[in-house]
Each structure stands twice: as structure tokens, then as C-alpha cells.
Image (cartoon, helix red, strand yellow):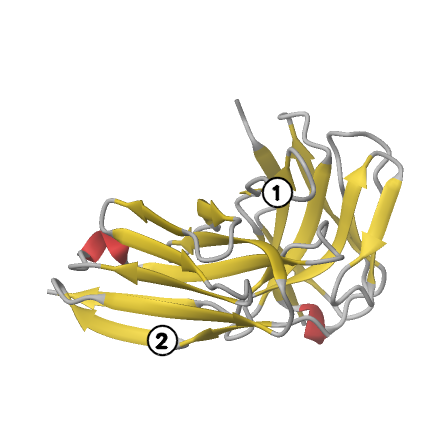
């Protein structure tokens, strides 16, 4: 089936360190979204990428969509304790654009 | 503006019982979906709907039914609860099925004993 995998599953960093999570799809994606879920909360939309090779920034967060539209990454510069949570990518596979398939998620823990 | 409202927030069921998880949105979104979240497995799509009267299966539809009689409501029915259905369930909606952000409800934590 159409799968979206994320690595790492878990990362623990000290405040101020950088963090990156990677998302890989088994098939080409028409677009990819990123969500953040705080502990005990629900997923909240961060951004959507549509074009091959697209790069978008939100303050300390940088999102990339691969040239082949099968992978994506989220990089956080100088993490803060407010960045704690689980980050999910979610993609729509070409041909089944109405289904939003979520990745397995990366849980980020930030300590002082 | 309430967004996406799910009820109940918590539920304990006995094996074999049936129940309906409610989901309502007030944003006039066409697309609605149900996910279950289990540790280490992300969010898996159960069923989705691209508009009133139209539903389709996601990745893990077995044991669940849905209907979409109105744009606002998208209930999820568990026909005969099993311990494997213990999970956190999220309902989501979006304006369009193909390229807009999904808004999630607060979730329902279901335990089947």
C-alpha cells in the first residue's frame, strides 16, 4: 500500500540544538503537509508544500519537498522547550489525492 | 467559531458493545475524515467523505461504519467493539479534499475491555 515513513521515531535534544525529521513516501506525492501535535493534544497544521524542490521557512522551521516529490524534511534551528511534541508529515499520493496519509511521526523532546 | 467538535472525549466499552463517536464541524467543509492514533503508528485513516452522501474506506476500515447525511456531521460507528480498537480517534475536516489544511477535533480516547 501507499506508505509514508518518518525517521527518527524519537529524538531528545538539549535546548539550542538543531533538529531534523525526514519523511519518505513509497510513491510520488501531489503535495505534502506538516503537522505538530503537543502532548495530549491534537494535530495542528504547520505548512503545505506543493512544488518539486520547494523550500519554505517559518521563523526557526525550514521545510523542504524533494525534487522527486517522494520525500520531505523539517529542520528546526536552535530548538526551544516550546518545540516539544510530535511532528507528522502527511501526503496525498498522486491519483488518490482525496486521501491524506500520515507519516509515523517523530517525537521531539527538548531539555534545558 | 467551534471548528471541529468530537464527543465524547473519553469512553470505556466492553467487548461486543457498539457505540457511535460523534463529529461535527461548523466551517462548511466538504471533506471529513476519521483517523485512529496508536503509539508508534502515526495516524491511520479509517474512513473519509468528500461530501454529503459520499463516503469511502481508508487504510483500516474493518469494524467501523460511517455515514454523511449532512455536510456538518460525520459519525463513526463501532459495530462490535474489540480490544484492538482501543485507541485515540480523531475527526478532521478540510475545505477541499485535495490541497487544503486539515482541522482536527480534540480526540476521543476509547478503551475496550
**Between residues B20 and B25, which one lies in front from this camera angle?**
B25
Above or below, comparing residue A2 to residue B13 in the picture: below
Q: Residues within 10 Å of mark 2 (few under 14, many from 20)?
A: some
**Between residues A80 and A93, which one lies in front from this camera angle?**
A93
Q: Residues within 10 Å of mark 1 (few under 14, many from 20)?
A: many
> What chain does mark 1 sit on?
B
Query: Which numbered disc covers residue B14?
Result: none
The single residue placed furthest to the right in the displayed view is B53
Q: Quadrant of residue B16?
A: bottom right
Q: Secondary structure at mark 2?
A: strand
Residue under label 2, please give it. Answer: A10
Does residue B109 appear left or right of residue A84 in this picture?
right
Above or below, comparing residue B2 to residue A14 in the picture: above
Does residue B90 appear left or right of residue B71 in this picture?
left
Residue A96 picture location, percent across and down: 75, 56
The reply to whether callout 2 and callout 1 are in contact (CB within 8 Å) is no
Query: Which numbered disc covers residue B99?
Result: 1
Residue A47 in view (yes/no): yes
Residue B98 picture location, percent across and down: 67, 44
Amino acid at each position: 500500500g501507499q506508505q509514508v515513513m518518518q525517521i527518527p521515531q524519537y529524538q531528545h535534544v538539549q535546548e539550542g540544538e538543531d533538529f531534523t525529521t525526514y519523511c519518505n513516501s513509497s510513491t510520488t506525492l501531489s503535495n505534502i503537509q506538516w503537522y505538530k501535535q503537543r502532548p495530549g493534544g491534537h494535530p495542528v497544521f504547520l505548512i503545505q508544500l506543493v512544488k518539486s524542490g520547494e523550500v519554505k521557512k517559518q521563523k526557526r522551521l525550514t521545510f523542504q519537498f524533494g525534487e522527486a516529490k517522494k520525500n520531505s524534511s523539517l529542520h528546526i534551528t536552535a530548538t526551544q522547550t516550546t518545540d516539544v511534541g510530535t511532528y507528522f508529515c502527511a501526503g496525498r499520493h498522486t491519483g488518490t489525492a482525496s486521501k491524506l496519509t500520515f507519516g509515523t511521526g517523530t517525537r521531539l523532546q527538548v531539555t534545558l | 467559531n467551534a471548528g471541529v467538535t468530537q464527543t465524547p472525549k473519553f469512553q470505556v466499552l466492553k467487548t461486543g458493545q457498539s457505540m457511535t463517536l460523534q463529529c461535527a464541524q461548523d466551517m462548511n467543509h466538504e471533506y471529513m475524515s476519521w483517523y485512529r492514533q496508536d503509539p508508534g503508528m502515526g495516524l491511520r485513516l479509517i474512513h473519509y467523505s468528500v461530501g454529503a452522501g459520499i463516503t469511502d474506506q481508508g487504510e483500516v476500515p474493518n469494524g467501523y461504519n460511517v455515514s454523511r447525511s449532512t455536510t456538518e456531521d460525520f459519525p463513526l460507528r463501532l459495530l462490535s467493539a474489540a480490544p484492538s480498537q482501543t485507541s485515540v480517534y480523531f475527526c478532521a475536516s478540510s475545505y477541499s479534499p485535495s490541497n487544503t489544511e486539515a482541522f482536527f477535533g480534540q480526540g476521543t480516547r476509547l478503551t475496550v475491555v
